[in-house]
Image: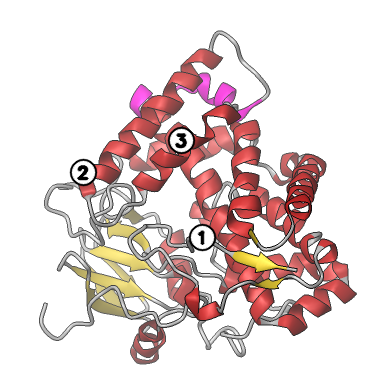
Amino acid sequence: MPGLPRLPFERPDVLGISPGFGELRARAPITKVTTAMGDEAWLVTGYEEIRQVFADDRFGRSHPAPETAARLSNNALLGGPTGEYATERSIHKEMRRLLAPAFSARRMRRLSDRIGALVGNLLDGLAEQGPPADLHAGLSLPLPIQVICELLGVPYEDRDRFRAMAEAMTDLTHPERSAAAQMEMNTYTYEIVKAKRDDPGEDVYSDLADASLPEDDVARIAGGLLFAGHETTVNQIDYGVLLFLRNPAQRDALLDDPSLVDGAVEEIMRVASPSEHGLVRYAHEDVEVAGVLIRAGELVMLSTPAANRDERVYPDPDTFDVRRRDPHPHVGFGHGPHHCLGASLARVELRAVFGSLFTRFPTLALAVPYEELKAHTDRLAGGIQALPVTW
């Protein structure tokens, strides 16, 4: 589409977001762009506007003609339409009804001692190894994997196997690779769910084993839980650490006042942006949002990183401030009926990490120049390849 801004935008800084998002929002919080696939899409960068789309059930992940639908990227998982157009709403409601108790804030709080112990063990391992160390490999990656394995009922000894699947699922360049990995993940996790029918445990997959949903949907949900349950938290830990190391006054404030940890977690979720890929929605009928008419079938890209830095809502939006107390909750976990089921779990994990990391290693610092950190630009979830630190 000649004349339209084309995704992805240039991103010069690992911790910053592409200036293009703010430039477009200054003109209009909903605007037409061209995707990496050459298709037209509506890009939503405004805070209030993105909340409206999240809350409006006239937008969905499915499309009546998925083969011809506009796409955001080549990724099979989140690059285009998913789910059945006729049943998307009912399946989504049933999935949330089934899983909400398993991911309730109360249940997650009961896990906090166990998660705290896991963090302590990993920090012990880093201390024993000594500096320099890769914090990504020593903490950010193994913690969410251990936690999600225990919660779902997945064998921890399979971690290398499903981690390889998860990484392949995020491939933005080869759609066949990401599609095959997603199928492999769904098949792998569904076998575990089926085994729970004869040998249930106190875990989420045992709950899924009794679900009155089609087998394909159970497999897709099981695979999605294992993927999303660790992939995004890994990156939020890495980026949270980076935010503190680049803002030492904020690290010192947290050390001086540990009660700031809750606010720090919310600020990490607001500011950290490992990926700028965006969330896919399709209008299921004509919808007007903020004076913009979006036609049935058109693609909408929700940029939560941009919305979380909307200067109309957040004073000094690019500033990382653990003391920030804003009445507007960030949209890092979505909003409304599409608020992330795993939000409470992610919060418990992040609190455990940032409530103890700098107490244990108060002199933690990058072991390489910041500019040398390598970001994954070919993966859906983004993130960095390694986080070398010393102390």
Determine which quarter of the picture holds residue 243.
bottom right
Task: Tell me the magenta residue range.
Answer: 203-216
Residue 334: assigned label: 1
- Whether residue 265 sits left or right of residue 258 in the image: it is left
Residue type pointed to by label 2:
Glu
Residue type pointed to by label 3:
Phe
**Residue 213 seen in the current view:** no
Which badge, 1 or 2, is on the more N-terminal residue?
A: 2
Residue at 29% across / 80% down in the picture?
31
Quadrant for the C terminus, please. Answer: bottom right
The residue at which mark 3 appears reads as 162
Which colour style is shown? secondary structure
Q: Is residue 212 above or below residue 84?
A: above
Q: Is residue 160 above or below residue 27?
A: above
Residue at 60% across / 27% down in the picture?
153
The span from disc 1 to disc 3 (Cα, nearest Å) is 26 Å
Residue type pointed to by label 1:
Gly
Quadrant for the N terminus, please. Answer: bottom left
- Whether residue 340 sits left or right of residue 219 in the image: it is right
The span from disc 2 to disc 3 (Cα, nearest Å) is 18 Å
Residue at 80% across / 65% down in the picture?
361
Residue at 57% across / 28% down in the picture?
157
- Please identify, in this view, whether the residue under mark 1 or under mark 2 is nearer the observer: 2
Tell me if residue 206 is in the magenta stretch.
Answer: yes
Task: Out of 223 and 130, give the one closest to the viewer.
Answer: 130
Task: Out of 135 and 279, give the one closest to the viewer.
Answer: 135
The residue at which mark 2 appears reads as 176
Is label 1 in contact with label 3 (beta carbons under 8 Å)? no
**What residue occupies the far right of the structure in this picture?**
256
